[in-house]
Image (cartoon, rainbow, N blue to C red):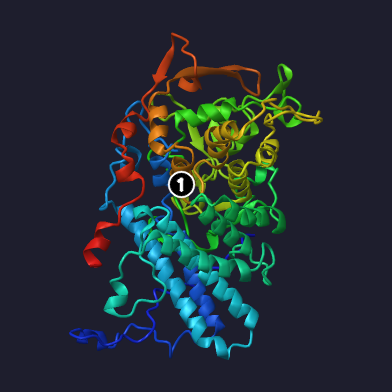
Amino acid sequence: MKNTIIKAFLGLLIIGSFSSCQDNDFLDEVNPNEISKDSYWRNLKETGTGLNAVYKILHSPFLINIIEEMQRSDMGYPGYGRPVPQFTEPFYNHTYTASSDEIAEKWYTNYQGIFRANQVIEALENIEGTVSDREEWISQMAQARFFRGLFHFYLYTTFNDGKIVIRDKVAVTEADFAKPLSPKVEVVAFVREDLKYAYEHLYKNGEYPDGDLSRVTSGAAATILGSTYLYELEYNMAMPYFDDVIYNHGYQLEYDPAKLFTTAGEFNKESILEINFSEDFIRIELSRWNGDSGTNWLNQQTSGTRGATGPAWIAYEYKTEPMDPLDDRNYYNNPISGVTQRNVPLRASAMMALVEDTQTEYYKAPTSEYTRFNGTAWGFAWWKKYTNHDIVASETELPYNSATLSSKNVVLNRLADVMLMQAECKIKTGDVDGALELMNEIRKRWGLVLLGPSGSDSAHTYDEINYTAETLMHQLMYKDKPLEMGAEGHCIRWLDFQRWKKSDNYGFEDRLRELSNMTFYGVNFIYSNDEGETVTKANFPSLVAQDPGVNRVIVDYEYDKPALNYSEATHGTYPIPLDERNTNN
């Protein structure tokens, strides 16, 4: 049964008395809706309820804008329509501006979370001398400071080259609201201070006294803290935090495919930070856009007409990863031909629905039978990470007969990402062998051919390449990182490119040029079903790299328009929202 921390939710609580300011007598007015410190925030129970309201911010779809970020990077084709998408999506086409709603909502949602965290922090400071349960006080303070740091982290990594407003206290006066932008170096220092406090004082994974798995942990703080150093190319500073997460917090790679990106796998042993949803707290009267509905609709947006389907390049990369012929998991018993190698690798089956995957179920039927594979309409691949394909035959079978009320959890950070970030740090500090070890641990989980010389290991197949720092970094950027972490977390793919632009002279502008020059071919797919009958999936749903010359469609259009529109100066980070510019002088 899913743990949940949201048992009660308070509206925005405005605490403190307004101070008087010259020519602003209205600030002396008493707000009849105000909940003052005299009537609330008096004990740990009340601050705990306020902390729950901070966690609730995670439910807002605008906090990280997953679909928009998939489209903005190279992880999402905008839904139905090929070669011309049915919908003109600004994030896919890179036509978003400072007035785009999604940009403004992300800004204000994160600052709303910061506001709530500041409420809890100030309240805890005020009652510190009166509480008897010191451990609970420290735990609540560490959680609140984690979130204040996290939300600032989300903002500075995506807005205005890192120059944002630091909000370190609840705004009360006019001057508090009208704060200037701070230089990136000051923002990063502020974020690290909060995260270091959280790292030192939060419980470790699985150690909360009440067993609540949905609470943030010191491992989560170390993950984000290490990321702040990696993103600034401070590899030696990042590595101790990543090492601590990998070896000292009880996280392990999840080998059970039934527990990766499924309902059964929520809060699995690989999960570090996860947004917790629950059927018990769905509010059907609220809009799907409303973070208070207790749901997300990422399932619909990655399985329906409009949203983000798998682009051709990643569908092809997933299905062509080399499988280890020595791994028994890469074989199945074909009723006609006997023991046969799988059509697609295990990683592809876990993360993406592909027409060739005759061995895996998708919505309670063999994946190959799915009706929406279509090279001239729906496309070639569907992301599995946010859908309920494992528990229903259709998203409309969810409670309340609504495909837009999904209570599937959303994983923001997991161990594999930390291992890959650490591998990058090791590459950049000269430890190629150490990086190979980490990357191969992940590849071994999926039964893939391992990287590097085999040495004395006869139990696995290796590619026998002597990697250098440069060639292994290329492998990580082009293969291992996007195929393992595609479409996950807070802008992971986008922030990778922002970093690699500085470290490897390989930015998103370069990536778009590559994608716009790629050509694939959609062909019909022929396979044998469970009854041994030969079935032809028409409408060109399978991708190949070589032109068969006949009976195919050409896929060479996906990133042509984005490549023409994209400008690193304009689109590298989001602009400060227009509303913020207008209201904050």
Residue 408 can be seen in this image: no
Name the residue at 44% across, 11% down: 551
- Outermost residue, front direction? 430
Mark 1 nearby-residue class (10 Å; few <14, some 14–19, many ≥20)? some
Q: Is residue 420 left or right of residue 113?
A: right
Count of marks overlaid on the render: 1
Name the residue at 66% across, 36% down: 443
| Residue 69 locus on image (x, y percent) | 41, 45
Name the residue at 36% across, 45% down: 572
Most foreground residue, 384 or 446: 446
| Residue that badge 1 annotates | 495
Quarter of the image that includes the C terminus: bottom left
Amino acid under disc 1: Leu
| Residue 409 locus on image (x, y percent) | 55, 54
Location of residue 336 with respect to 158 vertically, above or below? above
Q: Quadrant of residue 531?
A: top right
Q: Is residue 329 left or right of residue 273?
A: right
Local SS, label 1: helix
Quarter of the image that includes the N terminus: bottom right
Location of residue 9 with respect to 398 vertically, above or below? below
Location of residue 369 with respect to 134 vertically, above or below? above
| Residue 343 locus on image (x, y percent) | 63, 24
Q: Is residue 293 left or right of residue 134?
A: left
| Residue 11 locus on image (x, y percent) | 40, 73
